[in-house]
Image: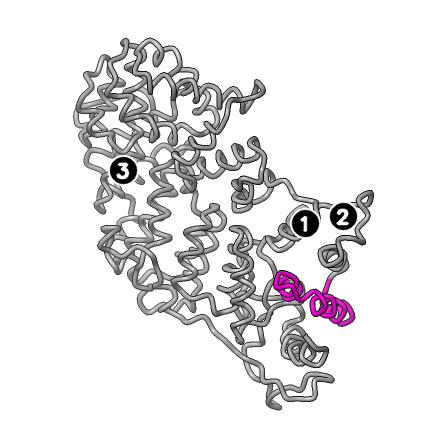
Amino acid sequence: MSNRRLTLWLAPLVVALAAGAGRAQDMPGKPLSAIDWLSESVARPPPTMPEDGPQRAEGAGRIVPIIVTQLGGPDLDAVGLLPPSVTGLPADLWGSSRTEDLVRLIRESRAHALPALQSLFQTLLLAEFDPPANEPGEGSLLLARLDKLLDMGALDQAQALLERAGPTDPALFRRWFDVSLLTGHENRACATMRATPGIAPTFPARIFCLARGGDWNAAALTLETGTALGFIAPEMDALLLRFLEPDYADPSDPLPIPARPSPLVFRMMEAIGQPIPTGSLPLAFAHADLRNTSGWKARIEAAERLARAGILSENRLLGIYTEREPAASGGIWDRVGAVQAFDIALLSGSPDAITKTLRPAWNAMKAAGLAAPFARLYGARLARTPLPPEAAALAFRIGLLSKDYEAVAAAYEPRNAEETLLRALARGDAGGLSAADPRAAAVIRAFGPVDLGPAMRLRLEQGHLGEAILHAIDRIAAGMQGEIEDVTEGLALLRRVGLETTARRAALELLVLGRRR
């Protein structure tokens, strides 16, 4: 690229950066997303044209109009991947709820409390619903859904949602660019950046993309220009310099590791030979460790983090667990060894071998917060296996956490009051039962006649169904922390609005996962 061509390209960038004080913004007049680790990859032009018309870039020799883009209002908030015919939820789920209330509920959701709530919440984030009536959100509801998916580590889902929306607006492109960096599709993101005139990349993003495209001279000149203009911070300047000129780096003088790197910084640190461990980074970064270039232990740890959040499939987790035999003992290796031993025992069909290995594998996975993936892998098959009474009782509980919980319950003959209650909940009928345990008693009440609180009744009467469901998810999560009555109202609401399967599975998870063994 000639110096003149590069200068012409830099002109609109300089104008946009100068007008925006060098910082990208998601929305005019609104704060940045709660996801504070996104790269500053694009510059947002000012929302209105200056009174004196187009500005002239200093030294550019031509007039450069400021391009203004806005998120596309209600249509963007309606973007989704799952139509009502798939979710079973009405298209007008959001009703006339205030967009800002929905955004707050999504951002503050504690759906991670139980696997059933995780699944329902992900459906709400990915579903195709009409935007809130009479509440133009200017895309804020879509951004909240995307940011929550990123926070949950659901990169594939976020990427699909972004591509359905079309990442041509700076706020959307910024997220798509970072997802592409974390999933290893940076070349595609850079090509899109070059092909999208409305996107004004910041200097670091432009330099990175020029280098990825093999134009090292233009990248170096852009770095020089950005530094001279004061648009590149000293720490970023040092990183970019090493990224462009690795031969000049002094191995004895490594760069400091940033505490909160953006995906762009993360990728460049990796490129200069200083990869950043992902264990303390936001969950989205764990995907980088799933690559075959990572060590087995790092891949296991990343897979466990993502499986715990309901993002990685249990089959993928098992595949990583069983890649080879553990070469050490203690901690994660004991867990991997216990699962491998149980997997072999179940394949053998030997009741003795299964009985011997089941309890250690279950205890190890439950202690690591991975009981749900374990149950989805083995629950239904285990429940069909003839076992001694104690092992059969454990297999029954594990089976209730699988998608075949109703069949598991129907095939099992309870031997005590606790098992009777679990089977009744799996069938959705706990009438006439009681329990001394406060949590179990709260669950039982939810499966009988329940008077919802006035706030929840009002939401339903006003047609704020989606808002009510989000509150119900939060109520159940709060109930797990001690507000027992919230469990009753949350489960009862889910049943009232037709989410019976979710209510039953959440009830079973509350009781089964709440036990120590």
Q: Is residue 153 left or right of residue 262?
A: left
Residue matched to label 3: 503
The foreground one among 452 and 94 is 94
Q: Which region of the structure is painted magenta? A: 205-232
Tell which circle, 3 or 2, labels the residue nearer the N-terminal end: 2
What percent of the width, then of the height, locates residue 83?
Answer: 27, 57
Quadrant (top left, top right, bottom left, bottom right) of the C terminus: top left
Residue 134 lies, with reference to residue 234, above or below; the image says: below
Residue matched to label 1: 269
What percent of the width, then of the height, locates residue 24?
Answer: 60, 66
Quadrant (top left, top right, bottom left, bottom right) of the N terminus: bottom right
Amino acid type, residue under disc 3 in the picture: Ala
Which is in the foreground here, disc 3 or disc 2? Answer: 2
Tell which circle, 3 or 1, labels the residue nearer the N-terminal end: 1
Amino acid type, residue under disc 2 in the picture: Leu
What percent of the width, then of the height, locates residue 364?
Answer: 46, 21
Amino acid type, residue under disc 1 in the picture: Met
Residue 511 lies, with reference to residue 292, above or below; the image says: above
Spatial distance from mark 3 to mark 2, Cα to Cα?
51 Å
Magenta-drawn stretch, dominant element (helix, strand or loop): helix
Spatial distance from mark 3 to mark 1, Cα to Cα?
45 Å
Q: Are marks 1 and 2 in contact (CB under 8 Å)?
A: yes
Residue 223 sits inside the magenta stretch: yes
Residue 174 sits inside the magenta stretch: no
Q: Which type of secondary structure does the marked residue at label 2 adopt?
A: loop
Quarter where residue 332 is shown: top right
Residue matched to label 2: 255
Residue sitting at x 29%, y 25%: 399
